[in-house]
């Protein structure tokens, strides 16, 4: 694959500004024989189809709710597609607007912003081209983050270096700048003192069965907890404490499980943020922690002189509102 990987932000105020940047990107891909994807809703799809004319037949339109289903899984799937397309001598070209994920709960928005940064490391050598249109109507924090996570800015058909771009690792560290909230007083606590994790998994299972966590997610949690605790046993320092609790209030109810230990992580550990590559390229972290990110809704990691914390969050089903009783009915 001779082309270099590109990752551009397309800021726009009006629909015409969007089309001025997106149409050349899509048309160039179709003309070059790229695999061209446009991740957008039905209204935007109709607009693009009409503007592209016959070229629209060469574009795959993808429903954004499905594409932006989970930060780590989307990153892994897209990278796999880029490698597969490159192996066949073609280029993956993706137009993806952050409208869907920008409206999600704050912790998920933060992870999508981090993915935007880590794309610049994960996709090196793929030859893929990714363009992300950012409307000025998006939340100001989302727009500002978009300017810091894309090496290039597009205006019309012109691409230029983005002076606001941040190093991806520095941006990721910025995402983790705030300390984690203190666990609630009612959190269950278990000290891990031996490498046999049978009783640990039994303890997690028993606690989870008291919550609405689906069985499928419980199996994911057990694999993730085993990996994190094993990592703490091998590389951390006692005491190793596992805590669990639920957060039922707000728009994002979650089952939360955290593992703390007194050790610290070496610089450059990577925190499992970059998918491993089948080509053997550097991944920026251990496969196990990347798998943990695939298994959980959100993974938060903090490490420093006071020890290390890995906090796993799995989304809980929303509890339907109970209609009020009227006249005893």
Image (cartoon, rainbow, N blue to C red):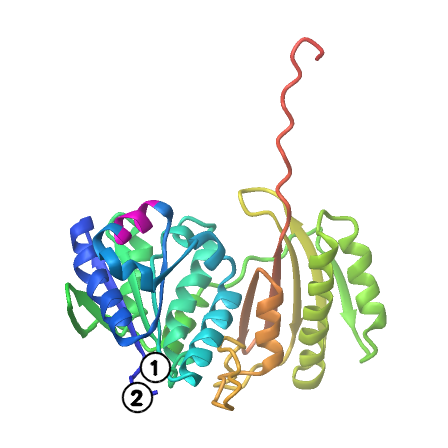
The percent position of residue 105, horizontal first and vertical second, equals 47, 50
The percent position of residue 116, horizontal first and vertical second, equals 38, 68
| 188 is higher (above) or lower (below) than 327 | below
Please give the residue where the numbered disc 2 appears in the rendered image. 2
Residue at the image position 66 percent from the left and 50 percent from the top: 246
Residue at the image position 80 percent from the left and 76 percent from the top: 193
Q: Quadrant of residue 173?
A: bottom left
Query: Crowding at label 1, few (<14), some or many (≥20) Cα neighbours within 10 Å?
Result: many
| 36 is higher (above) or lower (below) than 236 | above
Is residue 222 a member of the stretch shown in magenta? no
- Observer able to see residue 307: no
- The quadrant of the rendering that contains the C terminus is top right
Give the extent of the magenta segment.
43-49
In-front residue for pair 325/128:
128
The percent position of residue 235, horizontal first and vertical second, equals 65, 85
Q: Are marks 2 and 1 in contact (CB under 8 Å)?
A: yes
The percent position of residue 142, horizontal first and vertical second, equals 33, 56
Q: Image check: 181 left or right of 144?
A: right
Query: Crowding at label 2, few (<14), some or many (≥20) Cα neighbours within 10 Å?
Result: few
Mark 2 vs mark 1: which is more N-terminal?
A: 2
| 177 is higher (above) or lower (below) than 251 | below
Dot 2: element: loop
Dot 1: element: loop
In-front residue for pair 92/201:
92
Residues at marks 2 and 1, CA–CA distance in whole angstroms: 7 Å
């Amino acid at each position: 694959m001779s082309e270099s990987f590109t990752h551009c932000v397309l800021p726009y105020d009006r629909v015409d500004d969007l089309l001025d940047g997106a149409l050349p990107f899509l048309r160039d891909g179709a003309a070059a024989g790229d695999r061209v994807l446009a991740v957008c809703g039905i209204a935007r799809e109709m607009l693009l189809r009409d503007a592209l004319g016959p070229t629209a037949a060469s574009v795959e339109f993808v429903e954004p709710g499905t594409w932006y289903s989970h930060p780590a899984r989307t990153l892994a799937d897209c990278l796999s597609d880029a490698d597969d397309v490159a192996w066949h001598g073609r280029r993956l070209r993706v137009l993806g607007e952050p409208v869907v994920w920008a409206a999600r709960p704050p912790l998920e928005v933060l992870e999508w912003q981090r993915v935007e940064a880590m794309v610049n490391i994960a996709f090196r050598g793929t030859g893929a081209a990714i363009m992300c249109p950012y409307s000025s109507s998006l939340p100001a924090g989302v727009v500002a983050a978009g300017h810091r996570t894309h090496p290039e800015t597009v205006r019309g058909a012109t691409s230029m270096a983005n002076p606001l771009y941040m190093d991806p690792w520095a941006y990721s560290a910025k995402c983790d700048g705030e300390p984690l909230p203190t666990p609630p007083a009612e959190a269950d606590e278990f000290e891990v003192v031996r490498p046999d994790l049978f009783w640990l998994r039994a303890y997690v299972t028993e606690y989870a069965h008291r919550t609405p966590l689906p069985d499928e997610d419980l199996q994911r949690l057990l694999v993730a907890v085993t990996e994190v605790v094993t990592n703490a046993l091998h590389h951390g320092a006692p005491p190793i404490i596992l805590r669990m609790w639920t957060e039922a209030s707000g728009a994002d109810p979650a089952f939360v499980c955290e593992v703390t230990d007194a050790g610290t992580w070496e610089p450059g550990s990577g925190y499992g943020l970059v998918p491993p590559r089948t080509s053997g390229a550097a991944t920026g972290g251990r496969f196990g922690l990347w798998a943990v990110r695939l298994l959980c809704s959100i993974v938060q990691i903090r490490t420093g002189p006071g020890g290390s914390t890995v906090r796993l969050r799995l989304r809980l089903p929303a509890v339907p509102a109970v209609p009020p009783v009227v006249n005893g009915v």
